[in-house]
Amino acid sequence: MRPLTASLNRHSFQPSAITFSPPISPFTPPRLLASPLIQTIAGNFLRTVKGVTFQRHRLQTPDGDFLHVDEALVAGTTLSANAPVVLLLHGLEGSARRGYACEIYGQLAQRGFRSLGLNFRSCSGEMNQTERMYHAGATDDVGLRLAWLAGRYPVAQALAATDLWTFDDFCTAPLHGFRSAVDYYLQNSSGRFLLQIAVPTLLLRALDDLFFSESDIPYAAIRANPNLHLVLTPHGGHVGFWEGGNRWWAETQATKFMARHLRTSYDG
């Protein structure tokens, strides 16, 4: 299945209008298994974590809490002391040890990159010690961990990809100082920050994602920033992109993209 990249007009997805920047391999779901439901379920249950073990680092936060960072150790790979470092941030209610994370760690290690995963508060298997948990705009914890990485790997280069509305309105928003779910979404929507992104960033999205509507895609902001590379596929479900067997399209494209741009920056 050909991905749709350069054409950001959502009403004109004809293949003849498509150019490929960055180069992206086609996504080809297994025959008869392109359903977004099948792709989403496969992505959740079929990704393997074999061959990846972890060294856990416990880091204290200024407000008396802690964060766990998992350093991935991939069997059969040896990394140099100055290998570039990638910090992975997991999705909602996930962890740094989810299947898609392990797939990325493995592919990065094969390309000579060291990878670590940040577990957001309450997501490492141990409940955090303060009332604060995590939310979409809590980037201060990420900043602290990036500073820690810079100190731990000074010669390397770090790169840092139910009814939720009711939950956010009654829990997330008041707990973290927002007036309501609307206020929380307005202040923390990534769309507000897209124009400020100053490094090459790959945006992968399946148009049949079960959790999000195509109307959520901020085409105008993406079009206005040349650092943003949008890739849309007709199929893939929610964090699926399964091509059969142990072939996971999204992780492959993401690690290729990171390797290309990190190597260019690192060597330059």
Image: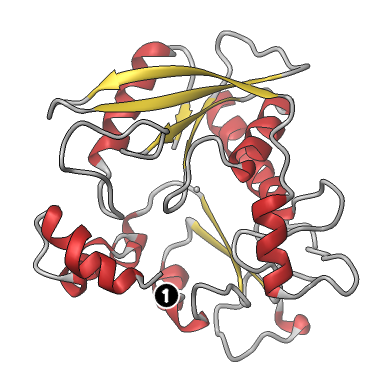
The answer to whether residue 150 is left or right of residue 168 is right
Residue located 82% across and 58% down the image: 243
Residue 198 seen in this snapshot: yes
Q: Label 1 sits on what residue type?
A: Pro
Residue located 27% across and 47% down the image: 134
From this viewpoint, which residue is outermost toward the top?
81
Residue 259 seen in this snapshot: no
From this viewpoint, which residue is outermost toward the right?
31
**Residue 159, image x and y in percent?**
47, 34
SS for dot 1? loop
Q: Nearer the viewer, residue 194 or 21?
A: 194
Q: Nearer the viewer, residue 23 or 140?
A: 140
**Residue 17, image x and y in percent?**
71, 82
Q: Quadrant of the C terminus?
A: top right
Determine the image quadrant of residue 234.
Answer: bottom right
The answer to whether residue 69 is left or right of residue 38 is left
**Residue 170, image x and y in percent?**
18, 67
Q: Is residue 206 above or below residue 121?
A: below
Q: Nearer the viewer, residue 62 or 84?
A: 62
Residue density around tag 1, few if under 14, some if 14–19, many if 20 or more, within 10 Å: some
Q: Is residue 13 above or below residue 141?
A: below
Q: Quadrant of the N terminus?
A: bottom right
From this viewpoint, which residue is outermost toward the bottom?
11
Residue located 9% across and 67% down the image: 179
Residue located 62% across and 71% down the image: 6
Determine the image quadrant of residue 203.
Answer: bottom right
Q: How is the image coloured?
A: secondary structure
Residue at numbered disc 1: 218
Determine the image quadrant of residue 123.
Answer: top left
Q: Is residue 120 above or below residue 13?
A: above
